[in-house]
Image (cartoon, rainbow, N blue to C red):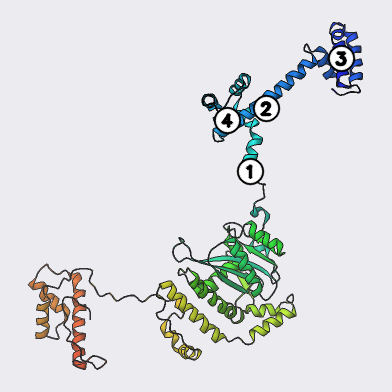
């Protein structure tokens, strides 16, 4: 109650008017109420409650003080009991309060006033949590986490149809895994970026697929691209869609977009380069470790120059659907370097830097470096490092080019491993018991055919040799005749002119 007179004066006026108000008729009550409201300056409803109260104002004041005192005592006791119960929740603390209070009092740790004890035992779990809320928040020292918008909601979506012939500097980036046939464990990854306008492609190896390494890789790529980077477009990989890369693009003033989930064609430019550049030069083997990463980095340094300056590629000009068929028209094949030099938005300083870098490049020397790095990677992938890594000079490499096509695959990373000759039997030899007898028949009649020999065996041993074993006998006789012919030509000397041991064909050995 706030007014123009002091608090003691308000209490004296209230005591005087209370009896008059309660005994007065309705018309006089209104006058007394108006007089008290004007004097005390309180609300009319509050004045009615004060004038109708049976307990004096001083008694109410004392009761309020006592109520606050007991509330504070209950809070203090609850804090002690809460700590003694190892800071459990209000519902669990309520269940153990009676036994906990008795145990603490029995051992002399706590002495409670009867009124405080009664109120502690009658307090509800919700009241316990409310009384301890401030204590808990300060004891936990946890800051409330600010609700933030997911990074995916802050990154705009761009489809394959939204590019609309962009300027040089807008990139699509993606990861290429070098884990072989298994995704378990640690292995290398390639971070690949291609310019949508020119097709300029850069790739760097990463020891892990991690968001901080992505930003480091982008810093390296920005120094290698011959023009400023304006924006990047990624898929929905968690290594791309995160606050780290989003903040990086905002700080560097780069436009950041993403493709739709499960729509590979939204990143058609980079998906094509993943196969045409990375898989073509690196292959599909598993690579891990720092040594393999350094070797892969050397390969990419040669590949970027060889592909961007000396490898023409097609670029789609238009696409038109005619019924069930799609008719595509392409621009004339050109290298990424040529497309950058022909674009009007690229500055003359950047074009001059391209010409200076392209001038001294030797495509054959770059291909030689690529083949040496591929040989080292192939050795690492097969676990045979140190074998078959004979370094050839550029002249030796050039001398092998005219006959290299005879060896088949030229890329060491894509060559199939030489299979071991099959020199063991998987089934019992059906002619093991009768082979000496067959040799005698061959010595008596060297011109006899294998079919005639099989018929003689069939007559002598009926039912032992089915018709399907005739082919086995024919191969065995052909091998015997080849050895006999070799002896007639070379005698007992092998093809190198050295004395060789006599060869005896028996029991199905292969010669």
Identify the residue at horizontal 22%, vertical 71% (top origin). Answer: 425
Q: Nearer the viewer, residue 127 or 14?
A: 14
Where disc 2 sits, the SS reads helix
Image height check: is 447 above or below 29?
below
Q: Position of residue 162 (x, y in %)?
A: 68, 63
Which of the 4 quarters of the picture holds residue 108? top right
**Circle 2 residue:** 72
Q: Nearer the viewer, residue 297 or 273?
A: 297
**Circle 3 residue:** 12
Q: Nearer the viewer, residue 50 or 272?
A: 50
Image height check: is 41 above or below 267?
above
Whether residue 326 can be seen here? no
**Circle 4 residue:** 81
Q: Nearer the viewer, mark 3 or mark 1?
A: 3
Where disc 4 sits, the SS reads helix
Which of the 4 quarters of the picture holds residue 504? bottom left
Specify few, some or many for label 1: CA neighbours under 10 Å numbering under 14, 14-19, or 20 or more: few
Q: Horizontal placement of 136 versus 179: left or right?
A: right
Q: Position of residue 281 (x, y in %)?
A: 51, 75
**Circle 1 residue:** 141
Please tell me which of labels 2 and 1 falls first in the chain. 2
Q: Nearer the viewer, residue 219 or 353?
A: 219
């Amino acid at each position: 109650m706030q007014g123009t007179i002091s608090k003691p004066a308000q209490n004296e006026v209230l005591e005087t008017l209370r009896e008059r108000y309660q005994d007065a008729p309705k018309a006089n009550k209104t006058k007394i109420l108006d007089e008290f409201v004007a004097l005390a300056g309180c609300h009319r409803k509050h004045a009615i409650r004060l004038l109708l109260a049976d307990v004096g104002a001083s008694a109410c004041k004392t009761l309020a003080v006592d109520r606050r005192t007991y509330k504070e005592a209950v809070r203090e006791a609850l804090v002690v009991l809460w700590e003694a119960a190892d800071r459990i929740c209000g519902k669990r603390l309520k269940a153990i309060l009676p036994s906990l209070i008795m145990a603490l009092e029995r051992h002399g740790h706590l002495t409670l006033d009867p009124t405080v004890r009664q109120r502690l035992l009658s307090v509800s779990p919700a009241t316990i949590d409310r009384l301890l809320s401030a204590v808990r928040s300060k004891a936990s020292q946890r800051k409330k986490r600010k609700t933030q918008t997911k990074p995916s909601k802050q990154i705009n979506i761009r489809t394959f149809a939204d590019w609309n012939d962009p300027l040089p500097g807008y990139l699509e980036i993606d990861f290429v895994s070098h884990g072989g046939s298994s995704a378990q464990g640690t292995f290398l990854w390639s971070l690949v970026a291609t310019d949508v306008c020119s097709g300029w492609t850069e790739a760097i190896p990463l020891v892990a697929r991690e968001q901080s390494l992505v930003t480091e890789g982008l810093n390296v790529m920005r120094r290698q691209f011959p023009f400023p980077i304006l924006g990047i477009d990624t898929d929905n990989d968690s290594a791309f869609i995160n606050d780290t890369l989003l903040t990086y693009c905002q700080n560097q003033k780069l436009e950041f977009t993403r493709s739709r989930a499960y729509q590979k064609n939204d990143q058609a430019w980079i998906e094509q380069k993943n196969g045409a550049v990375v898989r073509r030069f690196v292959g599909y083997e598993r690579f891990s470790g720092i040594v393999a990463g350094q070797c892969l980095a050397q390969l990419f340094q040669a590949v970027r120059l060889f592909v961007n300056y000396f490898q023409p590629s097609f670029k789609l000009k238009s696409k038109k659907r005619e019924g069930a068929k799609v008719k595509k028209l392409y621009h004339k094949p050109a290298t990424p370097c040529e497309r950058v030099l022909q674009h009007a938005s690229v500055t003359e300083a950047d074009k001059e830097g391209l010409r200076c870098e392209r001038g001294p490049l030797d495509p054959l020397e770059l291909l030689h470096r690529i083949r040496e790095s591929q040989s080292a990677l192939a050795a690492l992938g097969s676990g045979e490092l140190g074998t078959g890594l004979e370094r050839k000079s550029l002249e030796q490499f050039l001398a092998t080019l005219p006959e290299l096509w005879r060896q088949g695959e030229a890329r060491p990373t894509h060559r199939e491993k030489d299979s071991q000759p099959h020199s063991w039997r998987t089934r019992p030899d059906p002619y093991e018991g009768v082979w000496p007898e067959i040799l005698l028949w061959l010595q008596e009649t060297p011109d006899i055919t294998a079919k005639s020999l099989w018929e003689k065996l069939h007559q002598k041993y009926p039912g032992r040799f089915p018709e399907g074993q005739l082919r086995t006998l024919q191969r065995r006789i052909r091998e015997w005749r080849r050895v006999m012919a070799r002896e007639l030509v070379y005698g007992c000397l092998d093809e190198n002119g050295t004395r060789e041991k006599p060869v005896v064909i028996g029991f199905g050995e292969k010669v």
